[in-house]
Image (spheres, grey):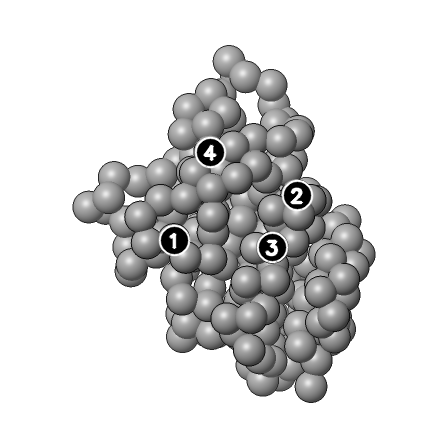
Amino acid sequence: MSDVLIVPTGTANLASVKAAFQRLDATVEMVETADQIEAAQRVVMPGVGAFAASISHIREQGFADPLAARIKAGRATFAVCVGLQLLFEESEESPQVHGLGIIPGKITRLPDTVRCPQLGWNRVEAGPGCSLIESGHGYFANSYKAAPPLPEDWPDDWAVATADHGGPFIAALERGPLLACQFHPELSSAWGQALMARWLERTA
């Protein structure tokens, strides 16, 4: 069985994510059937592009339900960029299009007071409870973001890392073997590679 199975979300960063895991000596394959998602030790859900296009592609392939099931069950899953956004219920980018609904709330556009899309390096601050995510600098490419909730409103013991671009937003989330990053760890030099390595080690 492959060390890592990557969900083809119809987006552009599949090759770079695959190459980053291969640099860590992981065996990587693309998901072809829903049964593979259910059986896999580790699943990665990358994404670059539109919220609606990504979730539509996942649903058309029959991947949405097994993905949601394994995340709710706390099984090793790593979501990147739009992959993080798909964990939420909806996005301003695609009104009336439903995400996986794992986390309550809506993805919103970055404010007009800053460059949009955000393209480049930004500081990531690991919050309380983060063990996979360490503070450092990640590479971002996003026009939309998830706003951090008040601590008392945060569901199900997720730990949160934040960044700031026209206001604070969620840079990454983790809960046990579940990891979701708004930044691109595969493009975040040694700091991002180290994060991917920790996830592989702790989900072995």
Number of the label disc, if any, that sits on residue 188? 2
Residue 111 visible in the picture = yes
Residue 156 position within the rendered picture, expressed as x and y whole percent measured from the top left? 29, 60
User: Residue 69 or 130: which is nearer the viewer?
Assistant: 130
Residue 121 position within the rendered picture, expressed as x and y whole percent measured from the top left? 62, 31
- Mark 2 in CB contact with mark 3 (< 8 angstroms): no
115 w.r.t. 190: above or below: above
Circle 4 residue: 163
Which of labels 3 and 1 is toward the front? 3
Mark 3: secondary structure: helix
In the picture, the quarter occupied by the N terminus is: bottom right
Q: Name the amino acid, label 2.
A: Ser
Of all residues, the one furthest to the left in this rendering is 152
Q: Residue at x 47, y 57 (%)?
A: 132
Dot 2 or dot 4: first in sequence order is 4
Q: Residues within 10 Å of mark 2 (few under 14, many from 20)?
A: some
Dot 4 or dot 1: first in sequence order is 1
| Snapshot quadrant of residue 26 | bottom right
**Mark 3 vs mark 1, CA separation in Å:** 15 Å
| Snapshot quadrant of residue 188 | top right
Q: Residue at x 43, y 38 (%)?
A: 125
Circle 1 residue: 130
**Mark 4 vs mark 3, CA separation in Å:** 19 Å
133 w.r.t. 135: above or below: below
Which of labels 4 and 3 is toward the front? 3
Dot 2 or dot 3: first in sequence order is 2
**Mark 4 vs mark 1, CA separation in Å:** 14 Å
Circle 3 residue: 194
Mark 1: secondary structure: loop
Of all residues, the one furthest to the top in this rendering is 113
Side of 190 relative to 180 (left or right): right
Residue 184 position within the rendered picture, expressed as x and y whole percent measured from the top left? 63, 45
